[in-house]
Image (cartoon, helix red, strand yellow):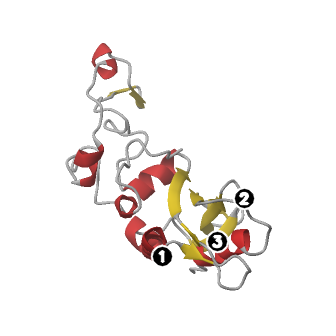
Amino acid sequence: MYFGLRKSLHAVVCNRLYCSHDLKVQISVDGVPLYKSSPMQFWPILCSVNNSSPILVALFLGTTKPNSAEAFLDDFCKEFDQLSKDGFVCVECARNVNLPVTLHAVVCDAPARAFLKNRKGHNSLHACERCEAVAVSMNNRTIFSSESCFKADKRCSDVFSDGGYYGTHQNDPTPLTTMSNDCINTSVH
């Protein structure tokens, strides 16, 4: 269910005394089990604007994580794209000012980050997000310990956006490339 980014911006800008020249959006995504004894889980998209309290933007409920990051983020990415181009104007409040909207950070744990970026999981041999190091599997563990790992080439945002790491690091295109032209170095925690 998609509630809307614009509503979150409205809650932050119009329902409070707000003094800023731009809106820096931080989104958080993670799977949350509904009950210990149930496979049901929530996957919320939470939004914080200029360090505000988090506001619910979207919520997925299912027995597994969403099937695709593209479907999960589709409405959010479309609305964010429109807001980043046109800015945000709160017509209901006294401040009728157009505020630029930018992506500040995406905050997730390692499995959620891999899901959103459509890349291999954090325990795969090509898991490193920042470099092209290849791990080895030892005793059912993925280990980045050889000297070559520390001398590996850095990953390039342009190559990532163009799908240059498909088959090793990436599974499919990520919708995050519509929100940021730098999915390697943008603050994705």
Amino acid type, residue under disc 1 in the picture: Glu
For label 1, the crowd category at 10 Å Cα-Cα, with few meaning under 14, some 14 to 19 and many 20 or more, is few
Q: Which residue: 70% across, 61% down? A: 54
Q: Which residue: 52% across, 66% down? A: 64
For label 3, the crowd category at 10 Å Cα-Cα, with few meaning under 14, some 14 to 19 and many 20 or more, is many
Cα gap from disc 3 to disc 1, whole angstroms: 12 Å
Give above or below for 54 relative to 105.
below
Q: Residue 104 location in percent, x, y?
A: 53, 52
Q: Nearer the viewer, residue 14 or 78?
A: 14
Q: Which mark is residue 9?
A: 3
Residue labelled with disc 1? 79
**Disc nearer the start of the sequence (3/2):** 3
Give above or below for 115 relative to 14.
above
Give above or below for 56 relative to 109.
below
**Disc nearer the start of the sequence (3/1):** 3
- Do callouts 3 and 1 mark residues in contact (Cβ within 8 Å)? no
Amino acid type, residue under disc 2 in the picture: Ser
Q: Which residue: 65% across, 60% down? A: 48
Q: Residue 33 location in percent, x, y?
A: 66, 62
Q: Residue furthest bottom?
A: 92
Residue labelled with disc 2? 52
